[in-house]
Amino acid sequence: MKSGIILNLKTDDLTHSVRRNDPAGGCSTKKLLIPLMMLLGMLSFFVSCSESQPEQVHGMWFRPPDNAGELLESLEKMRDMKINTVFIETYYHSWSIYPGEKSIQRPEFLGWDPLKMTLDFAREHNMEVHAWIEVFYAFNPHYLDGTLGPVLTRHPDWMLKSNNPDDHTAEDGKLFLNPAHPGVQDYLMDMMKELVETYDVDGVHLDYIRYPVHTEVKKFGYGAYSKNRFADDMGYPDTVFLLGNPDVQKDFADWKKLIVTRFVRRVTDELKEVDKDIQLSAAIFPSYATDPQSLQKFQDWASWVKGDMLDFITPMCYAPNPEKRRQEIRESLEISNVPVVVGLAINRVKSSRDVEMLIQDGLTKGSSGIAWFAYNWRTPVFTETVTKRFGREQDED
């Protein structure tokens, strides 16, 4: 999305206009033409500067409701809040919101297509749509009364295993796909390529592009497939030592980070082949250098933002403490070589002042915009404050 004025003035048109109104011609024409040419040059300079500066992202993460009327109402409310980028939750719990051949549509959306409806609305209102994909997160115990879901039902061997043979759940009962399994990677790539080929989305937004959180008592990647592949890749003769040898544990951690990073590289390369203009982004945990727990997810995003893997990142700067949040934002901006759209949580907003503080933090120098988490957490005071703030800025522009 670009802002700016396109000028359709040509030098010949100006010369013709001057001469037509100058019966004397000659020197008089030159006197009038010179300042007009200077004016045109100044206008061209400002237009060029404007067009080189992309409009700041004002985004929102959004899980679509399960009926078309509510979806349309939600999109209208986001439009009124001057949201210009919708991160629509497109694939989660191993189901897609749209009908596809490479994925299974969620039961609540059968018979209609919320992604297509969102794209149709967005095109009418100058909004971008980015397909929000929950990559390795495969199962939520609260959805469909704990139904395992289509992917793990068909491929139980794709489940990411922990060091506890009786419990492979993580993060409040979730199950994850094994990032190291080639079947998992091929399936996810096929799903995303079909999505980009079928729908004119502006971007693909990667979430849960990581391992689950590791704790002192529960660690992940301990299934037979992962251990054997690690041993083969690293040249180890066996895997007996994995649970006790610190040096091997470090190699194992580095290997898991590399597995995820290589998949990010693959996603970018293969989706750009399908659509060279598709924008690739990722929701990442900030405080990479100062928070050791961020590395326990094996999300080495600092290496993703030094080259051409991603078009932008959305660090999830959700810390309730303002100074901690600002530290997360500063660190993300310092590390990244790609644009940073600051992710901000609105579940603790109680006043207009709270909202203004979040906006001020999110639009700090160097930021490429804000992404709000999430639509269903909005409150009247949040909606009113954001609408007034961004509406006023738009009017002034």
Image (spheres, grey):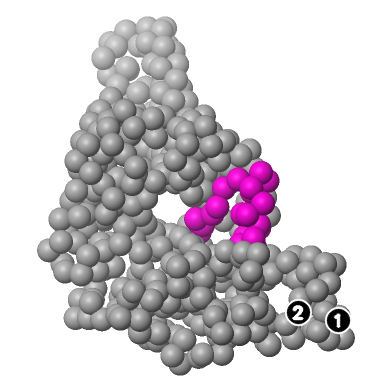
Given the image, on which type of amino acid does mark 1 rest? Tyr
What is the secondary structure assignment of the residue under circle 2? Answer: helix
Q: Identify which residue, 248 or 390, lies in the foreground.
A: 248
Q: Which residues are magenta?
A: 280-302
- In the rendered image, the quadrant that contains the C terminus is top left
Q: Which residue sits at x=47%, y=86%?
A: 152
Q: Which residue sits at x=34%, y=42%?
A: 348
The residue pinned by badge 2 equals 230
Tell me if 267 is positioned left or right of 236 in this view.
left
Vertical relation: 69 (above or below) 336:
below
Mark sitting earlier along the chain (2/1): 2
What is the secondary structure assignment of the residue under circle 1? Answer: loop
Q: Position of residue 159 (x, y in %)?
A: 54, 83
Q: Identify which residue, 169 or 63, lies in the foreground.
A: 169
User: Is residue 194 visible in the rendered structure shown here?
Assistant: no
Q: Which residue sits at x=86%, y=80%?
A: 235
Tell me if 256 is positioned left or right of 46 in this view.
right
Does residue 237 belong to the magenta stretch? no
Residue contact between numbered discs 2 and 1, judged by CB atoms under 8 Å = yes
User: Is residue 294 visible in the rendered structure shown here?
Assistant: yes
Q: Position of residue 172 (x, y in %)?
A: 45, 68
The count of marks equals: 2
Vertical relation: 17 (above or below) 156:
above
Does residue 291 belong to the magenta stretch? yes
In the image, farthest residue toward the bottom: 154
The tag on residue 165 is none
Q: Where on the picture, by quarter, is residue 173?
A: bottom left
The residue pinned by badge 1 equals 236
Q: Where on the picture, by quarter, is residue 9?
A: top left
Q: Identify which residue, 275 or 238, lies in the foreground.
A: 238
Q: Position of residue 180 (x, y in %)?
A: 64, 78
Tell me if 67 is positioned left or right of 262 in this view.
left
